[in-house]
Image (cartoon, rainbow, N blue to C red):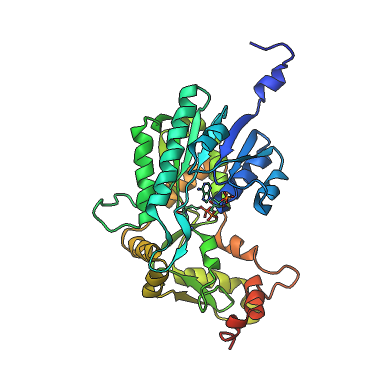
Amino acid sequence: MLEQGESIESTIYKKQVIAVTMATSRQGVGVVRELSKTNKYIIRAVTRNIKSAKAQDLEGLNNVELIKGDLLDSESLRRAFDGVDIIFGNTTPTKGWKPFRGSIVRSYELEQGFNLINQVKYAHQKGNLKHFIFSSISKAKDPLKNDPAPGHFTSKWDIEEYIEKKDLKKITTVLRPVSYFENFENKLPGFTISKEIFPGIVGKNFKWQTIAVDDIGKWVRGVLSKPEKYKNQSINIAGEELTGIEMALTLESLISLEGFKTNYVMIPRLAIKLLEYDIGVMADWIERSGYGADMKKLKAIQKELNIVPTSLKEWLDARLEKGNNTKSNWLRQWKDSQWKLQWDK
Ligand SMILES: NC(=O)c1ccc[n+]([C@@H]2O[C@H](COP(=O)([O-])OP(=O)(O)OC[C@H]3O[C@@H](n4cnc5c(N)ncnc54)[C@H](OP(=O)(O)O)[C@@H]3O)[C@@H](O)[C@H]2O)c1
């Protein structure tokens, strides 16, 4: 029934309110930007610091409002989720690097996850919340409980189990992304991407599933277009499945006019383990179990949900200097930086 002053159009097209946690994160920014373009939602971008430059950028987008919220502070989440129709939830294991610990702390992520799910439950019980999308991490088909898995994977799987325990599966879609393309932009001396080096953490012949972080936003937009079908579902999401050699050749094909050869360079596992032990365990795990995204099945779902995945080639191409297609931004940064000069033979 229409309320006084309401038109049919305003009722039919009433924008749903979605809270996006960790809105200034790489995933969060991708989700907020993608949903902003649809003009179908009011997006509550949740961040600990509404004054940060990243938060201010988000506020400049259509249909976006900022709200202060910390995943370690349940009260702030309760306020951020008040009256929302949908929640996109994400957590972070990254706490600040310390020697002999690295930056990944499992208990830090679990605390955020349990707070998040408890507040999702509260919002659902209040009656407004209809759909929860949790961004987890890709799972091989049957990860063995006793297999040594990285802590920041098991924390997400524990949060998934908590969703089930809280009887929220029926309103939840779990998206499980694989490694981001953005990881190729690491700053590790000797292993930064350049015309000659394509860095990676797994063997050169291993088929590695990867995704552009912004594509997570496309997946969120997609599942929200068919909510009833995609509630109570978990999907491992990926955009590419290429070996290291194939990835290096993809970059080489874009700068081939220069006559450079791009080699895939695997970062030594021991170095990774010394710097960030959990990432080393992750690399072992990826090589042993794979990520488990079903690329064939994904193609069909992407078609149904109008998702055009970003290819590695497109992603790399977008990072080449336009107007002078022979040099990449990485190449320029590489030359600008002191320590990189030693590699400029
Ligand atoms: N890297 C990969 O290849 C990959 C692949 C799949 C999944 N993942 C998962 O993706 C997640 C990280 O996402 P991302 O890379 O998009 O993050 P990110 O860019 O590293 O950003 C982290 C964000 O977390 C927010 N944050 C930190 N502590 C918080 C807290 N206590 N409460 C609320 N917000 C907090 C910060 O925002 P404010 O300071 O503005 O609050 C910051 O913007 C991790 O769980 C990771 O395991 C990563």
- Residue 175 seen from this side: yes
- Residue 294 seen from this side: no
- In the drawing, does residue 178 fall left or right of residue 66? left
Is 99 or 46 nearer to us in this picture?
99
Looking at the image, the residue that sits furthest to the bottom is 345
Q: Residue at x 43, y 74 (%)?
A: 266
Quadrant into which the C terminus falls: bottom right
Q: Which residue is drawn at 49% across and 28% down?
A: 123
User: Percent position (x, y) of residue 151?
Assistant: 36, 55
Is 24 or 318 nearer to us in this picture?
24
Can you tell which quarter of the image residue 312 is in? bottom right
User: Percent position (x, y) of residue 309?
Assistant: 55, 52
User: Percent position (x, y) of residue 79?
Assistant: 56, 32
User: Percent position (x, y) of residue 171?
Assistant: 44, 30
Is 344 or 50 nearer to us in this picture?
50
- In the drawing, does residue 50 fall left or right of residue 110? right
Q: Which residue is drawn at 58% across and 81% down?
A: 340
- In the drawing, does residue 48 fall left or right of residue 325? left
Relative to 27, residue 18 above or below = above
Relative to 301, residue 343 above or below = below
Q: How many labels does the image show?
A: 0
Relative to 88, residue 196 above or below = below
Looking at the image, the residue that sits furthest to the left is 146
Can you tell which quarter of the image residue 286 is in? bottom left
Relative to 46, residue 278 above or below = below
Quadrant into which the N terminus falls: top right
- In the drawing, does residue 336 fall left or right of residue 145? right
